[in-house]
Amino acid sequence: MHIAYSLPLRPQRVYRIALSTFFFIQGIVFASWASRIPDIKAKLQLSDAELGGLLFSLPAGQLAGMALSGYLVSRFGSRGVLMVAALLYPSSLLLLGLAPTTVMLSASLVIFGLCGNLINISANTQAVGVETLYRRSIMASFHGLWSLAGFIGGVIGGWMVTRGQGPFTHFCFIFSLSIVLAVVTGSFLLPRDAARKTGKTNIFVKPDRNIVLLGLITFACMICEGTMFEWTGVYFNQVVHAPVEYSRLGFIAFMTTMAGGRFAADYFVTRFGVKRMLRASGLIIVTGLMTAVLLPALLTATTGFLITGLGVAAVVPLSFSIAGKSKTIQPGVALAMVSSIGFFGFLLGPPLIGFIAEAFGLRVSFAVIAVLGLGTTLLAGRVKTDE
């Protein structure tokens, strides 16, 4: 890969640590929202179907910002865009805590989704450049920091609930933490992005077959991932009938193994290859979700969500890493394309769960998502990699 700078201005480890901080910010902000969904659902007195419909707003905002994010990163570079996004994203979290009605919450979720996509595309574009400096797979470790932040965010959310703190107070704490981290580490980000000599800079270029396949694989994973983020608390409340203090145990279990799996994924990719990792991931996802569906007790459901976390761990990082190394499309544009297709999983997954649950129950809806997750395995063999 040709990059726009010949030598890094700082040791490569400095860039890696700084960028990891921004993945951490992204993860803890999103997890803070996800951990308080049951409380917001109760506050606004929403049914499963109403919550499912309302959750359309978040991925709708993410999708609305895809082309914009790809353009801004390609035009101005990921560093500046990432700094702005790291300020906007936690700020939009405050809107969710203040929303007094479903209409206001829906509008706030659109803004939250748009800002989330902006930080996602810019951070992953930075990651492609840092991975280029290392000349080996490190993308999954960045996403591991995102997942670790999600675990910490879930723990903080549970702690806030036990102390009787409402979502807005919780979100104010996360906002303050995120702003401090961004300001302290922002000057150590990679100054320029990786770019291919033959890459197209136009955001509206037609995606090639490999980009579409990567997008579909990401879709199959993210429809499961979105379900786990936004419905595990409700599943533990209504199906597992977990005590209040354990209602977030499924989410924390999922985030724990997803984080651990991502830190280990780079090693397994080097040893077994990208395609084998992707094939195995889909099978693990199905195993985990069906365990929780068929055996919905506290211990077995928690075990199922632990397994599911391992299944989704490597899929998105590997898809993004391959897309960022496209020989025909600039990294920021390629990542926006894969994200655009993949985030339809977030668009369809949570509301699909709500509508199916309203008609047939949450267990049936989780089983449907498990089958869709198998798409990762079925499509993996068709993807072209650098292996």
Image: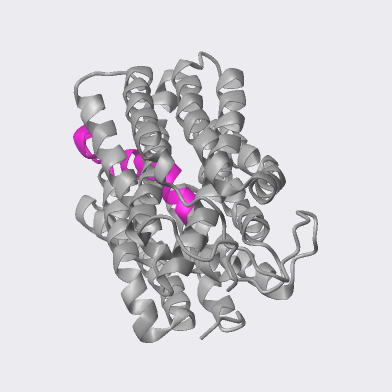
Image position of 306 (left or right of 63): left
* Most foreground residue, 347 or 142: 142
Say above or below: 90 vs 231: above
Question: At which x and y percent is residue 21?
Answer: 36, 45
Q: Is residue 216 magenta?
A: no
Query: In the image, is residue 323 above or below residue 49?
Result: below
Q: Would residue 230 be counted in the magenta stretch? A: yes
**In this rendering, is residue 89 above or below 256?**
above
| 269 w.r.t. 130: above or below | below
Give the image quarter of residue 334: bottom right
Assign the magenta stretch its main secondary structure: helix
Viewer-closest of 212 and 82? 82
Q: Over which residues does the magenta segment extend?
A: 225-246
Q: Position of residue 9 (x, y in %)?
A: 43, 55
Q: Is residue 295 visible?
A: no
Question: x%, y% of residue 61?
Answer: 63, 37
Q: Which residue is pictured at 56% across the width and 45% down the height?
A: 359
